[in-house]
């Protein structure tokens, strides 16, 4: 069963989005409603807390890439605490080359 | 804006659908979350779309195409609400079953879409399939987007190419490859710095279209034998999922695109070895995978009795010059160039592509014409293996339209024979070094892909270490593989501790590589030859997913000196355009010397028609003509004789002095007007 919980915390121009669950074709629709050109307007720092994300599909990855492309125009984006297994897939397809990852 | 032809009109279960669009063929994701399905069949009487949840034995829904959804011979449907990441699809076709007429419709079979861009079923390499599954190879829908960051095919001047042939899995599968993702596209990405260091600027990947490693798989002496090389295509539009570490996540397309992008970032082109001559469906006893159940008489060459012609040696032959199949091939090539940024193709048994529907060779095969003159493929490198298993041998006669190059099998045979010690091959060798103008004189030397070894046959080390093939591990009592290898073991079959033999083998390898990398035409190396990789005498490792096939990277350390030698040869070629010009230019230039000249033991003295084992050739590179600054003289001395010889060196203009660049033997050149060459050795001298 697809499930993704999204919590947002806005602090001025900084937006922290905490995700838990799976980001697949179904849940990525909801994810892209939270993170898109409109919702990110005026944001200069986007932090995605992904410690509790267990799966990212091709569709989910594409939402992240679109977010990265938006933030490249207006500020920074950091993916925090992504599980090493998922990070490895990002590496395999070359998408981690232009993303920033941090671990606490 | 929502387009009005994406509004659902029909409903089945919880899915809605409507008539689709004819183009493009295949399953295409629509921006409004619909998937457009479009498939051709001329002789079917009905078609049904079959959808599966990923990995399930039974479909969860089947949607027959209403008659109004068919336009001409194309069935189209747009379906809404599919989760593309968890859906597999196929088709059933109804129609006449009459094998004597070549009609094989069977609505009980579920068939793969010939245009499927991702294929499940063999997602994890070597994972045994469930035999009970009646639908083994299933279509999947992919996102065709990618972040290319400005990448496109490199379009390197083809005369400047140095091709390196490799098998994606073999290149990094060995535990000593040192990469993280062994045997995959991602693993190959990790080896790009090595290839860049070596200096090659083009990799030719052995088949990477989806194939079934379990086709004709078997066990021999406790070892599994596979369809390892993959010269048997299941789907022409899908990457081999088992080569992608990320395939279980449905991202094999992204992973391959990243590999190509990374190659390009490092100045290396990517050529795919493509197999259009036959498919994995085999002969009359083969499985229904796709084509035979969709339109057998369109896709295959059939005898008047409905049997398959077998010009491929693999059971069936694609009907390549049929207008529909022609379009499939063209669509496929265009897709790989436009969507994956592939730089070129090498066509396996390409002569089959010149046969008509009866199997007869055509004067102007429309498929080859179309490929040569296609708009999207306008800058794409096209290489033919200009022969087939039905007896066609078209080296030099393969219709090229000035665009097709050929694997020059004559070059391979001639260099091997000469270096082995066959003096009578000398006159032919002079032509081969010149770019084979005797064969390709009407075109240019780029038409000649020069090679000494390739995946098919001995590795370079084995060529100088084995007189005979040793294919016992293939389980065919050593009957398989070529018997005419023109190889010589230098005195002892296989591994030896004899220092003289070991040294001679090293020299022989260097001798052949020296000639290869200083001949006109496009050189091609077999991966691992640069450090004497061995297959232990197996010259047909098509079924070996084992240490026999996997490149053994420990040899790189052991044979570092050979690696450095090859690197120097590649570097020389890249620095000196006179070696790789695409013109057969041999006339006098502003250096006052002919651009290319042949010599004997005494300079300027060679009977080009006489047998011999000692000769030299010189490139007088005109610095002005080639914009390289000062002119350069390059003298390549070849002593294939088993005795020492002194070679006189040509007099060069004042201020120039001969210096040794590389030397396979131990010439101890002292700067005089002679060079002493030890038995079976080559040397390159440069005067600048």
Image (cartoon, coloured by chain):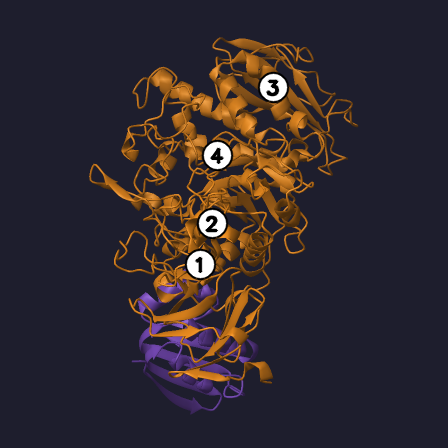
Chain colours: A purple, B orange
Alpha carbon separation for disc pair 1 and 4: 32 Å
Alpha carbon separation for disc pair 2 and 4: 25 Å
Q: Which of B522/A20 is in front?
A: B522
- Where does label 3 land, which residue? B428
Alpha carbon separation for disc pair 3 and 1: 56 Å
- Label 1: which secondary element: loop
> Is A10 left, or right, of B360 in this rendering?
left
**Foreground label between 2 and 4:** 2
Q: Are marks 2 and 1 in contact (CB under 8 Å)?
A: yes
- Pointer 1 or 4: first along the chain: 1
Res B96 label: 1
Dot 2 and dot 1 within a common chain: yes
> Is B99 left, or right, of B647 in this rendering?
left
**Foreground label between 4 and 3:** 4
- Pointer 2 or 1: first along the chain: 1
Q: Residues within 10 Å of mark 3 (few under 14, many from 20)?
A: some
- Where does label 4 land, which residue? B389
Alpha carbon separation for disc pair 2 and 1: 10 Å
- Pointer 2 or 3: first along the chain: 2
Q: Residues within 10 Å of mark 4 (few under 14, many from 20)?
A: some
């Amino acid at each position: 069963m697809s499930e993704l919980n999204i919590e947002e915390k806005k602090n001025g121009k900084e937006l922290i989005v905490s995700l838990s669950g799976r980001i697949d074709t179904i849940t990525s629709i909801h994810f892209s409603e939270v993170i898109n050109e409109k919702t990110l307007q005026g944001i200069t720092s986007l932090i995605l807390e992904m410690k509790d994300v267990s799966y990212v599909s091709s569709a989910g990855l594409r939402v992240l890439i679109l977010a990265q492309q938006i933030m490249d125009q207006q500020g920074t984006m950091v993916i925090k605490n992504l599980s090493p297994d998922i990070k490895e897939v990002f590496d395999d397809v070359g998408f981690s080359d232009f993303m920033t990852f941090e671990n606490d | 804006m929502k387009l009005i032809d994406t509004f659902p009109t029909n409903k089945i279960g919880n899915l809605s659908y409507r008539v689709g669009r004819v183009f493009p063929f295949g399953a295409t994701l629509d921006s409004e979350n619909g998937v457009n399905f479009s498939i051709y069949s001329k002789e079917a009487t009905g078609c049904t779309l079959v959808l599966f949840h990923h990995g399930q034995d039974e479909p969860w829904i089947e949607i027959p195409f209403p008659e109004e959804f068919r336009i001409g011979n194309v069935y189209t449907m747009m379906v809404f609400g599919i989760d593309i990441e968890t859906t597999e699809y196929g088709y059933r076709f109804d129609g006449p079953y009459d094998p004597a007429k070549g009609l094989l419709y069977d609505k009980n079979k579920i068939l793969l879409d010939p245009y499927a861009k991702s294929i499940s079923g063999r997602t994890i390499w070597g994972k045994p399939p469930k035999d009970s599954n009646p639908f083994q190879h299933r279509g999947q829908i992919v996102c065709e987007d990618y972040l290319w960051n400005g990448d496109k095919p490199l379009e390197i001047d083809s005369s400047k190419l140095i091709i390196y042939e490799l098998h994606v899995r073999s290149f990094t599968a060995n535990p000593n490859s040192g990469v993280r993702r062994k045997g995959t596209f991602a693993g190959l990405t990790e080896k790009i710095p090595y290839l860049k260091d070596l200096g090659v600027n083009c990799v030719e990947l052995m088949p990477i279209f989806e194939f079934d490693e379990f086709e004709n798989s078997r066990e021999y002496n406790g070892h599994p034998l596979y369809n390892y090389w993959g010269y048997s295509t299941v789907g022409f539009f899908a990457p081999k999922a088992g080569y992608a570490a990320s395939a279980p996540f449905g991202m094999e397309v992204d992973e391959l695109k990243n590999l190509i992008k990374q190659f390009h970032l490092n100045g290396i082109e990517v050529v795919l070895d493509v197999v259009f001559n036959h498919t994995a469906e085999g002969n009359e006893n083969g499985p229904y995978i796709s084509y035979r159940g969709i339109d057998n008489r369109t896709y295959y060459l059939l005898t008047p009795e409905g049997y398959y012609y077998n010009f491929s040696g693999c059971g069936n032959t694609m009907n390549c010059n049929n207008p529909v199949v022609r379009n499939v091939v063209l669509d496929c090539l265009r897709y790989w160039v436009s969507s994956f940024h592939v730089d070129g193709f090498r066509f396996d048994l390409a002569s089959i592509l010149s046969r008509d529907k009866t199997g007869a060779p055509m004067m102007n095969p429309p498929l080859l014409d179309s490929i040569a003159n296609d708009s999207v493929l306008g800058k794409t490198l096209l290489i033919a293996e200009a022969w087939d298993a039905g007896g066609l041998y078209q080296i030099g006669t393969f219709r090229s339209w000035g665009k097709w190059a050929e694997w020059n099998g004559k070059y391979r045979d001639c260099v091997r024979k000469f270096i082995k010690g066959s003096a009578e091959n000398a006159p032919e060798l002079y032509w081969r070094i010149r770019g084979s103008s005797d064969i390709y004189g009407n075109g240019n030397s780029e038409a000649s892909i020069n090679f000494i070894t390739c995946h098919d046959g001995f590795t370079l080390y084995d060529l100088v270490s084995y007189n005979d093939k040793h294919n016992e591990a293939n389980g065919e009592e050593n009957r398989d593989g070529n018997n005419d290898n023109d190889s010589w073991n230098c005195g002892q079959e296989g591994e030896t501790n004899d220092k003289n033999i070991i040294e001679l083998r090293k020299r022989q390898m260097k001798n052949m590589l020296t000639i290869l990398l200083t001949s006109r035409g496009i050189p091609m190396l077999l991966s691992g030859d640069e450090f004497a990789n061995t297959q232990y005498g197996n010259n047909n490792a098509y079924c070996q997913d084992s240490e026999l096939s996997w490149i053994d990277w420990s040899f790189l350390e052991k044979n570092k000196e050979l690696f450095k030698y090859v690197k120097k040869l590649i570097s020389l070629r890249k620095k000196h355009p006179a070696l790789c010009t695409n013109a057969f230019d041999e006339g006098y230039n502003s250096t006052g010397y002919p651009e290319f000249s042949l010599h004997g033991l005494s300079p300027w003295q060679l009977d080009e028609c006489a047998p011999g084992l000692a000769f030299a050739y010189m490139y007088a590179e005109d610095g002005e003509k080639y914009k390289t600054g000062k002119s350069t003289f390059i003298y390549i001395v070849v002593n294939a004789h088993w005795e020492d010889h002194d070679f006189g060196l040509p007099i060069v203009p004042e201020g120039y002095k001969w210096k040794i660049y590389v030397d396979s033997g131990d010439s101890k050149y002292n700067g005089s007007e002679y060079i002493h060459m030890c038995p079976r050795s080559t040397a390159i001298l440069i005067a600048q």
